[in-house]
Image (spheres, grey):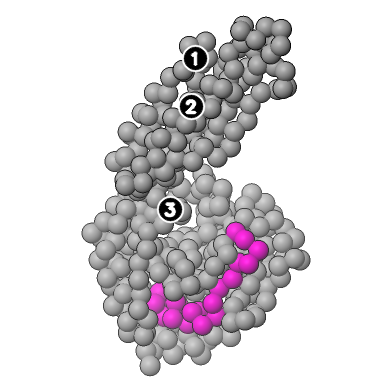
């Protein structure tokens, strides 16, 4: 049996215990006290194997003490320890092991991935496997809310690395890695109309609601599935009373693109929106907030290496592209080879049935350790 897989199996119960401790330390985005407790726990769990720096904003950077001399370059693990779940979510969806799975808030997205990486570093140390590069792990606390504070840190640390391993959950129950992610944009389109009494002075008004309906149809037409472009007008507000011609209406639209080169063209389309009713005014704000992670030649080579190493573990590893985004979007856009989806294999991220497969814990840890040793 592969030595890394053998190690992971021997440590299986301890890893489940670590995952449980991480899950039961609730850490919703934006809750400073909870996030500090989570950071303290992570430091406690890894201080014996890594030099840890607490960065501005509450993020953590761990530099692991691993076997091997004259290390050149660095591999960066990337993850987050905030979750979408509020304090108290554990009361209605407690951590538990049942039906071949681990359940609980944040277990898939992405506390299991963090636990896997820490366990993989322990495997390298305890098996005394020399690594050619330094290995660090950046854990941020605001990924679920857009990474406003951590993005500069992520980009800085990625630029100092030869490859990035992202610990987000895998695609599907077969555990596909992610070699491409769509970029994400958010646009807000507001129409300013002319208010009037809808019964007494109908013709004096210019309805922002009617104008916005026309603009929404035009925006939806920006979707081009062949090019991987989608526009979703997701939230609409407008008007004040049923007998008042609406003076203002707003739509918030989600944009997804597969290629960075499409961003300027789509941005121009949004900013070129003109009113159908000349008495109205259209105001556009927003833009691309996460660039796409494209499947470059460097990403393809990294996946090829991972696929070969997984085969040594008896795993047929496949790749996938997804419309969802992660902090890997930032690193991939810098041109740093980025491999995403190395975390838990399961389903139900952000949902009450969030869970990971117990029988995919060991091979995931082994794969991360083998990648760190091979790159």
Image mark for residue 277: 1
Give me the C-alpha separation between circle 1 and circle 3: 35 Å
Residue 165 relative to residue 360: left or right: left
Rendering coords of residue 8 (x, y %): 47, 85
Asked if the residue at tag 3 contacts the one at tag 1, i.e. Cβ–Cβ closer than 8 Å, the answer is no
Task: Kindly identify which residue carries mark 2.
Answer: 215
Q: Secondary structure at mark 3?
A: loop
Residue 153 is at least partly visible in this image: yes
Q: Nearer the viewer, residue 350 or 116?
A: 350
Residue 239 relative to residue 342: left or right: right
Residue 35 relative to residue 305: left or right: right
Q: Secondary structure at mark 2?
A: helix
Residue 82 vertical placement versus 347 (above, below): above
Residue at the image position 75 percent from the left and 60 percent from the top: 88
* Quarter in which the C terminus is drawn: bottom left
**Which secondary structure type mostly characterizes the magenta part of the structure?**
helix
Q: Is residue 363 magenta?
A: yes
Task: Kindly identify which residue carries mark 3.
Answer: 323
Residue 295 vertical placement versus 269 (above, below): below
* Quarter in which the N terminus is drawn: bottom left
Query: Which tag, 3 or 2, sits closer to the chain's start?
Result: 2
Residue stretch rendered in magenta on the structure: 350-370
Rendering coords of residue 235 (x, y %): 58, 37
Give me the C-alpha separation between circle 1 and circle 2: 11 Å
Rendering coords of residue 278 (x, y %): 48, 11
Direction front: furthest residue: 199
Rendering coords of residue 189 (x, y %): 51, 28
Residue 129 vertical placement versus 118 (above, below): below
Q: Is residue 122 magenta?
A: no
Give me the C-alpha separation between circle 3 and circle 2: 24 Å
Residue at the image position 55 percent from the left and 31 percent from the top: 251
Q: Quadrant of residue 317 in the image?
A: bottom left
């Amino acid at each position: 049996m592969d030595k890394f897989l053998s190690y992971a199996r021997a440590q299986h119960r301890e890893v489940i215990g670590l995952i449980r401790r991480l899950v039961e330390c609730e850490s919703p985005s934006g809750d400073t006290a909870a996030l500090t407790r989570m950071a303290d726990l992570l430091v406690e769990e890894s201080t014996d194997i890594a030099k840890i720096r607490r960065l501005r904003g509450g993020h953590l950077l761990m530099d692991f003490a691993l076997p091997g001399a004259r290390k050149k370059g660095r591999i960066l693990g990337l993850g987050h320890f905030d979750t979408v779940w509020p304090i108290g979510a554990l009361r209605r969806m407690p951590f538990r092991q049942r039906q071949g799975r681990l359940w609980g808030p944040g277990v898939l997205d992405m506390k299991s991935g963090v636990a896997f990486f820490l366990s993989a570093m322990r495997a390298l140390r305890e098996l005394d496997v020399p690594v050619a590069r330094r290995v660090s792990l950046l854990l941020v606390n605001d990924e679920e809310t857009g990474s406003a504070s951590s993005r500069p840190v992520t980009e800085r640390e990625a630029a100092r690395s030869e490859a990035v391993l992202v610990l987000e959950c895998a695609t599907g129950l077969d555990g596909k890695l992610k070699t491409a992610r769509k970029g994400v944009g958010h646009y807000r389109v507001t129409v300013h109309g002319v208010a009037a009494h809808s019964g007494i002075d109908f013709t004096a008004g210019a309805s922002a609601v009617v104008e916005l309906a026309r603009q929404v149809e035009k925006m939806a037409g920006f979707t081009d599935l062949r090019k991987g472009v989608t526009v979703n007008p997701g939230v609409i507000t407008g008007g004040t009373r049923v007998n008042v011609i609406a003076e203002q209406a707003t739509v918030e639209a989600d944009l997804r693109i597969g290629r960075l080169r499409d961003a300027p063209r789509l941005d121009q389309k949004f900013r070129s929106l003109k009113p159908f009713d000349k008495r109205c005014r259209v105001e556009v704000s927003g833009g691309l907030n996460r660039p796409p992670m494209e499947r470059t030649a460097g990403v393809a080579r990294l996946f090829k290496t991972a696929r070969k190493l997984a085969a040594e573990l008896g795993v047929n590893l496949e790749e996938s592209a997804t419309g969802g985004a992660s902090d890997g979007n930032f690193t991939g856009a810098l041109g740093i080879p980025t491999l995403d989806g190395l975390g838990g294999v399961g389903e139900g991220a952000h949902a009450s049935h969030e869970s990971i497969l117990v029988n995919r814990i060991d091979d995931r840890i082994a794969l991360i350790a083998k990648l760190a040793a091979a790159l």
